[in-house]
Image: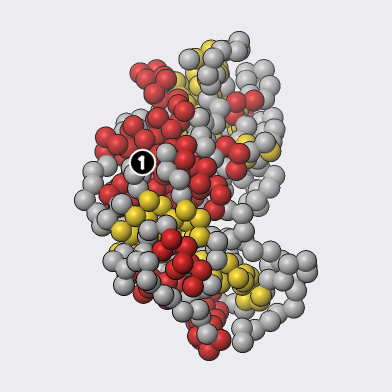
Amino acid sequence: MVTTDQAAPGPVIRDLKGGIVVPIPSDIDTPQPLNTGVLTQDRAQVPESITWRGGNRWTFDPRIPEPQEIQQMEGRYLFAGLLYGHFGHFLVESTARLWAVDQLRDQLDGIVFVPKVQRRLDAVKDNYQPFFDLLGLDLPIYNLAEPTACERLFVPPQGFGMFGMIQGLPVYRDFMRNRLAKSIGEGGARKIYVSRSDLTHQRGGILGEVRLEAFLADQGYDVFHPQNHSFEAQLQAYKSADYIISPDGSPLHMAALVARPGTKVAVIARRPNIALQFRYQFSAFCQIDTVTVDALINHWIPESEDLPNRLSYGELDETVVCDTLASAGFVASDARWPKMTDAERQEIMAVLETRQRGKFKLFIPGLVNPPLKQAP
């Protein structure tokens, strides 16, 4: 439903004449503050343009641009929010308002985003164009770096998001799954392990993940490196699989968009308190009760960090990983995987630090910035 002000059942899409899209100021290139959003012609903030993470605001009131700064766009546009370069945040937050395309149907001439970072604007947009194509979005897409007044601007609230919003609104879930179902076929491996071991510098993961890959290959799993495949091939792999095992991370957000309800999904925790997010998402999107593999025994974090984060490496007790997967039917009941030895850990850490171009230390809960401790 489209309305201007009054409340209505379901998500309300604001319909503005002359709505002004205000990006983050070009001289800001830090995580916060994200002062961006939409203003009315009278320079009032449009609440539906706020980006939320759970119950917390992630974007804040945009600055009021000077009249001479404001570009003009004729036509009717959907405000889609922040366009992230980071793949996981793109999936969870940059697609969060696209559900409104189904509601507005033939009333749109294009879709407008604002850049998360004021660099490589066209490159970021072009990188995700194949995903937009898979959604059947046959509309021009703009990544606006300057304040822009649209002749008519539709501003929907988020239908998806981080933390408390990870289950998504029904209109968002239906939009994503229905549209991708039309464009994605099956035909991939039936058992896949989604690996992080080939990711580039500045990406966290599982310590000694190649060991885990070898164990699972013996159990008939194909090792899948999603970054080496097109978006269509990634989605096809997740849609085709009967068994998906993956560390917690961005690919699982994509898998939940197309996985069949009967698929068995195991999430291996590599960071604290993240795997539960995927349980909620898979349950809401495809009625899958994921298996959480909680086998973390250590966190190895960059020397400059204080807490485990996206750059850290989780060390697993592989015997616990094996037992958990075996009890849930992902691997044979008689499978036995040995724990990493001290010598193996030392060798793995040496390779990791060379690849990541920096030292790692053992995270010790309760200590701030603990001293560097080399692996034994």
Mark 1, residues whose alpha carbon is within 10 Å: few (<14), some, or many (≥20)?
Answer: some
Q: Which residue is depicted at the point 54% across and 40% down?
A: 166
Q: Which residue is depicted at the point 59% across and 61% down?
A: 271
* Apparent side of residue 89 relative to residue 235 in the rendered image (left or right): right
Q: Is residue 43 above or below residue 243?
A: above
Q: Quadrant of the C terminus?
A: bottom right
| The one of 137 and 54 positioned closer to us in this rendering | 54
Residue named by callout 1: 261
The image position of residue 195, as x and y in percent, is: 41, 64
| The one of 108 and 271 positioned closer to us in this rendering | 271
Residue 263 seen in the figure: yes
| The one of 261 and 123 positioned closer to us in this rendering | 261
Q: Residue furthest left?
A: 187
The image position of residue 153, as x and y in percent, is: 51, 21
Secondary structure of the residue carrying tag 1 is loop
* Apparent side of residue 350 relative to residue 59 in the rendered image (left or right): left
Picture quadrant where residue 101 is located: top left
Q: Residue furthest right?
A: 367
